[in-house]
Image (cartoon, rainbow, N blue to C red):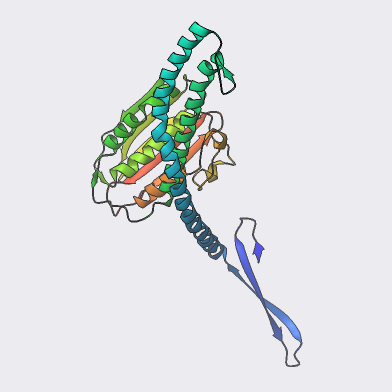
Amino acid sequence: MIYAADGSAWAVRAYPLKDEHGKVVNVIDVCSDISEKIRLRAEADRNSRLASLGELAAGVAHEINNPNGLILLNTPMLRDVLIDALSLFADHYQQHGQLELGGLDYQELRDELPLMLQRIEGGAERIKRIVEDLKNFVRQGEVDLSDQLDLNEVVKAAIRMVDNSIKQATDHFEAVFGTLPRGQGDFQRIEQVVINLVQNACHALADRSAKIRLVTYYDAENKCNILQVNDEGSGIAPAALPHVTDPFYTTRRQSGGTGLGLSVSARIIREHGGQLEVQSTLGAGTVVTIKLPITKEGECA
């Protein structure tokens, strides 16, 4: 096998030509382009690995979710107990002077215990998000595309869901809604995609002066509804850009990214016959474009 300058792979077979005495007098070389065969084999291997990974992820998600649910269920009660206990600690400190529990004096109890509980809750919520990402990654099956879908209403609902994240990330958020024909699709799954894209945009911003802008419009030529999510964030490095929709690929590992959000989003859009495209300039921002056909049988170019 040899590789051409354009990256294509070629299989080479040599057939000797012999004379009447059995001596090789010539050779016929037959070259076949096997690039597609190699690509399909690699894709089959990758799908097989992902299927195995999906089974593992489903088991892990279940085993983690149950004990983490207990943490989330009980921390509000612990918070209430802590508030009452700190009041008692304060009274004791005023009446009797120094107080020490578990090796912590009163000042440390007052300052550190609320932070400890806050970190526990934050960690549990992070685990919950990771489990949800794993469950979404594993979730497969037929998508019901028979329902009427108003993309503008989906986007508005998603914005309401992440309103707090938007307010914490930027002072400059804008959503511009064009006139769209109704399409067909699953409202909640497309809402899940929009929520993920807006949250990614929020995480990408360096400060509150950077902008996030959402725009919807209708592409009459290709009969597709379009959503663009534009952020003025940190952007994506050119080397990373081709991998942003790969499962478990993330540039935010240290801040809690699982690398599943865009992968799941891209799959949902494909299930709807659409496309998810990412364009980015490092240091300048990112534009994610969703294209959704307005008919179940349609596909967006």
Question: In the picture, which quadrant includes the N terminus?
Answer: bottom right
Residue at x-position 39% and y-position 28%: 76
Give the farthest residue toward the bottom.
20
133 versus 86 height, above or below: below
Q: Position of residue 136 (x, y in %)?
A: 41, 47
Can residue 120 be seen?
yes
Horizontal placement of 10 versus 142: left or right?
A: right
Instruction: Identify the residue at image location x=48%, y=49%.
Output: 60
- For residue 229, say whether it is visible: no
Residue 31 screen position, x and y as percent: 62, 70
Residue at the spot 36% in from the left edge and 25% down from the top edge: 174
User: Residue 61: x percent and y percent?
Assistant: 45, 47
Determine the image quadrant of residue 219.
top left
Count of residue discs: 0
Which of the 4 quarters of the picture holds residue 241?
top right
Q: Residue furthest front?
A: 96
* Residue 183 in the figure: left or right of residue 288: left
Identify which residue is drawn at 34% across, 31% down: 161
Nearer to the camera, 297 or 234? 234
